[in-house]
Structures are given as C-alpha cells and as structure tokens.
Image: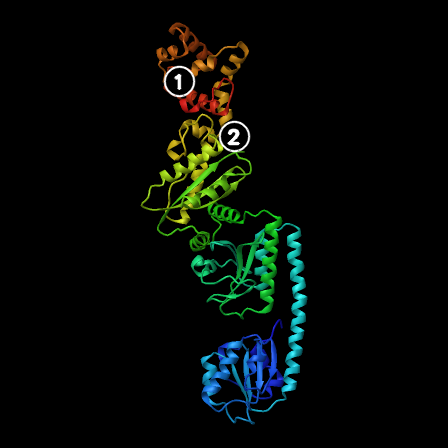
Amino acid sequence: MPFLTVADVLRLPVIAAGLPRVAAGEDQLSRTVRWVHVTELLDPASFLEGGELVLTTGMPHPADPTQLRGYVDSLADVGVAGLVVELGRRYHHAPQELVTACRERDLPLIVLARGVRFIEVTQTVHALILDAQGELLRRAQQVRELFTSLTLRGADPEEFVQAAADLTGCPVVLENLIHHAVICRTAGPPDGQVLEAWPRRSRTAPTPDRAAASGPEGWLVAPVEDRGRRWGRLIMLPHASGPPIGPEQTMILEQAATALTLARLTGRPEWDRRAHSSVLLDLLHWRYRSRTEARLRAEALGLPTTGHRLVPVVIDHGDTADGDTTVTGHLAAELPISGVKALVGDLSEHRTGLLLALARASAWQPVVERVGRDLRGTFGEGLVVAVGPGVTELSQVTRSFREAEQIADAIGPGTLDRPFHVASDIGLPELLYSLRDDVRVQRYVEQQLGRLVQHDARHGSDLLSTLREYLVAAGNKSIAAKHVGLSRQAFYQRLRTIERLLGNDLESGAHRTQLHVAVTALDVLGGAGGTARPASL
C-alpha cells in the first residue's frame, strides 16, 4: 500500500468497529491521509498542515450554525483529508448544519455510531503510514537507480519518458515551452486521444516549481530545465477512472524530470528536431494506426492540418554544412521567424524533410522558392530541393513524400539550375540518373556503345562526341557537322564508321532512339567521353 486514503482507513477493523457512515463528501474518499489528529479544540486548523484525518467527539463544536460553518471552513481551507465525528457524547446524530457545511466544501464527513478508542485508531493508522513511507523510500531508491543508469549510458529522452510511463502506469508527455508535445509515451498500447487538442488543454495547467497536480484535468506537472533556465515540462495524465495522484507517482515524475534536466546537460539537446524527425519518418512510412493518431501527433507539435494544404519537401544536401549549422537546424531556426508552420527534421544523414502547412487559398510556390533560394545561397548550389504534390489529408502525405524523394533521386549534375524541382522537371536524363545504380541500365549502355567507346580509347578518336551531336541535331547531318566544325563529307565518313562499329543504321528512327537513350545514360553515369550535360539531350 503506497499511501493510505480515507476509504482505506474506513476499512480498517479498528474503525469498522464504530460502524462508520459517510454523511458528506462521498466522492472525496480517495484523498490521501498523511496523519491522524485527535482534537477537541474549536480552532484545530492552526495546528494542522493538511492531509490529516481529524477525529473528534464533537464536544467543542459550537451550537451557532454560523460558527459551526466557520469551523468546517477552517478545516477545509487547511486541506484536511476528512472529519470523523464519534456519536454518543455530544451528538446522537450528525447535525444537519454540520452535514450541509461539509457538503458545500466537499469535505468527507464520517460519523461513528459506536465509540472507538481513538488511541488505537491513531496507533494503527500511523503504523501503516510509516510502513508506507518506508516502502516509498525504498521505491524511491529503486527509481533513482533506474534513472541514474539511463543517464550514465546516455539514454535518449524517449527512454526516460517511457520509463516514467511504465513506472506510473499512466500516459506521460514531454513538452517544450510553446506547448508542443515533443514526446508522448504510454504504459500500454499507444493512446492517440491523449494528445487531443493538446496545446489548448496544456495551457490550462500552470507549471509549478516542482512536481505537483495542476490544471482542471488534475495533471501531474514537473518542470524540466536546461542550464538553469526553464526548457519545458514533463506531464503525467492520470486515468479518468483510476486513483488520484499519490506520493509515488509524484516522486517518479520528479525523478524523471531531474534525469531529463541532466540529459540536456550531457547529451544531444535537439529534442524538438528529433520529435519532428520522428513524426516525418512515421508519415513517410505510415506507421500510424489511424488517421486520427497521425493528426493528433502532428497537431501536438504545432502543425495545423484541418483546412490547410500540406506540401512535402525533400532537401538533398549531401555533405553540405556550414560550420556547426546544418540544413535542418537552419530551417528550424528560420521558418518560425517567417511565420511558416512546418515540421522539419532529418530523414537520413544527407536528407532533410519539410512538411509545410499552408492556407489552401495561398500559393505554395513562393514559399518553396524562398526556402530553396535561401538554402542554396547559404549552403551552395549543389543542394537539391524537391517538392511533392500538395495534399489536404495527412494520409496522403506518404505518397507525396515518396514522390518528392523520387524527384530528389533524379536531380543530378548538369540539371537545370532551379530553386526547387517538381515532377514535371523529370525528363529522360533525370529518369536515367535516378536509375544510375541499376545494373540493367549499365548493361544496356555497354551493349549499345561499348565498341564505340573502346574504339575511341584505342585510337584517340572522338566518335562518341560525333554521335552525340548527331543525335542532338535529331539526325540532321548538316547541322551536326557545323556544330562539330567538320565538313559534311568528313562528318558523313565518321557516321559510316560509327554505323560499322555499332552495327546500326543511323537513318533508322528506332535505332537513333536506342542510341539516344544509351548516350544520355552514359553521360549521366559519367562514362568515358561523356561531357556530363544530360539536360541538353
């Protein structure tokens, strides 16, 4: 028994012998009993600290209803757990004025029809309380050792939050100062409803200086700091049908919040980015059980979804970095300043994901263009910004993100210089570039052009360039000859040599198409003789 409640005390034989009856405050019997206090004083509140179960025969109670109400008010104001009145000496039944006053203050009032020895009650209850406190101390040591172990091995913040949820048996949420739910964990299966309307509900619960109940929902809240300043807070949500918050849950949450504060000193502090990355990856691979769960998780991080156009963006930055600044960090800092609502996080070591939430009536192109120009100006022209189709449902984001990834895969060296790319920018060169690691493409290039490349290598000739210009000119020999600076006769002779080496009729449109694809693929693969200009073909 981690702590005693009024209901627990009423079940004890020493109290049950008095035939207790609850006359008021029936729904408050779950209050914790911190101590038992026997008193016959008219003003006992001055000697109380809160949490006491007050035992009395009613002898000092005033007959005046107003004074009796003041007596009850003083007990309620100090926060006693309940009032137990033994009948037989002052009262034969509880006065209606006393019952009414206790009901108005929601204070448990228990009347004992038979007399009991108050000394036995105090001895029994105090012994149980001391045992419970000893058990709580032993439990606190175990909890402290657990969180110390997690801290020493550099556990991620998700592990601390999960441990707190497992130990309390309740959902636990780590949020930052702007009420974004960075991490949410439950002891059992995920409960998406925990995050319903999270920012609005969270703002109704003030942050205490240390772990304590707060807000209309009775959340247990503990502050989390970062180098002496408030960073956010850890919140435990009690089950609606479960017991109220007790000392053990308070101790666990306080230990978890302390461990998270230490983790911010010793570990990687980008918890917000990790949370964004987690949600983006879950959307990319659709790991959510329902659309509602996905919506609540995104909205808990501040991304509006209803009534907005969602635009997925993939930024391929390779090894690009500017000192300690990463593309993800740069976007995370700049987007809020510009008023853009978005999730931004790492999809992989070389790619950043961005999910924009824009008003449906607004154009997305200017926003993405600003992002693209800013990133390319900061991190270099080699950075690629790929944009998937805008969607109106989170469940459609997965497909759109995958399309953005395919676009990013296809944009290679020599592609037209643009602040961002969409699916319509993908032509034959880009398609072949996206397939550059496919051995079938490599084999096709070798089958179509292998002998020509080998001939150039052996003889120092440049027949591959001649073929490329001929294909660019769509088979117009005169134009191609002029481009390479040869007479038509010399150019024709080169074409006949190419036909002999490849065994193809260059007058055939089908053969020219096959060779066009092969030359384009060779260029995007960076093969011999290629000029790395696929966009010109």
User: Element under label 2?
Assistant: loop
Q: Locate the C terminus and report the quarter of the image it occupies.
A: top left
Image vertical order of residue 233 relative to residue 386, above or below: below
Q: Provide the residue designation for mark 1.
A: 471
Query: Viewer-proximal residue, 70 or 56?
Result: 70
Count neighbours of disc 2 (C-alpha within 10 A) and say few if under 14, some if 14 to 19, many if 20 or more: few
In this rendering, position of residue 104 left or right of residue 208: left
Residue 224 horizontal/vertical position (percent): 56, 56
Query: Viewer-proximal residue, 132 or 208?
Result: 208
Marks 1 & 2, CB-CB < 8 Å contact: no
Count neighbours of disc 1 (C-alpha within 10 A) and say few if under 14, some if 14 to 19, many if 20 or more: many
In this rendering, position of residue 430 left or right of residue 307: right
Image vertical order of residue 147 relative to residue 97, above or below: above
User: Element under label 1?
Assistant: helix
Image vertical order of residue 133 relative to residue 278, above or below: below
- As shown in the figure, which amino acid type bears the numbered disc 2? Asp
